[in-house]
Image (cartoon, grey):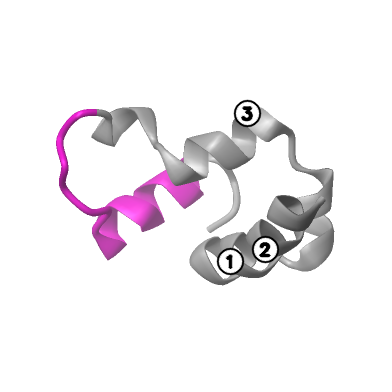
Amino acid sequence: MDRAARLAGVIPAMVGWRPDDFWSATPAEVAAILHPPELAGTGDGLSRAELNRLMERDGHG
């Protein structure tokens, strides 16, 4: 639970979720935010444009 509580503070700030959004997300959704498949193995950070594109695709933007 300690890790979940820490992530509950970080994930919403990263992607603009409300706390309820985080707590209702599946572990796979949280993992996808932390390690998006599009960036797997690239070592590059997520640009704001890419984040916006992903959020629009998922209906959160």
Q: Is residue 17 magenta?
A: no
Q: Are marks 1 and 2 in contact (CB under 8 Å)?
A: yes
Residue 35 position by quadrant: top left
55 shown above or below 36: below
Check disc 3: other Cα within 10 Å, few if <14, some if 14-19, many if 20+.
few
Give the Cα separation between the discs numbered 2 and 3. 17 Å
Q: Residue at x 53, y 61 (%)?
A: 15
Tell me: 24 left or right of 33: right
Kind of residue indicated by mark 1: Val
Magenta segment, which residues? 41-57
Q: Which mark is residue 28?
A: 3
Tell me: 3 left or right of 54: right
Tell me: 28 left or right of 42: right
Kind of residue indicated by mark 2: Arg
Q: Position of residue 58 (x, y in %)?
A: 55, 40
Kind of residue indicated by mark 3: Ala
Q: In this figure, which residue is indicated by the disc labeled 2?
A: 6
Q: In this figure, which residue is indicated by the disc labeled 1?
A: 10
Nearer-N-terminus badge (2/3): 2
2 shown above or below 40: below
Q: Residue at x 76, y 61 (%)?
A: 5
Q: Position of residue 55 (x, y in %)?
A: 49, 50
Front tag of 2 and 3 = 2
54 shown above or below 61: above
Q: Position of residue 16 (x, y in %)?
A: 59, 68
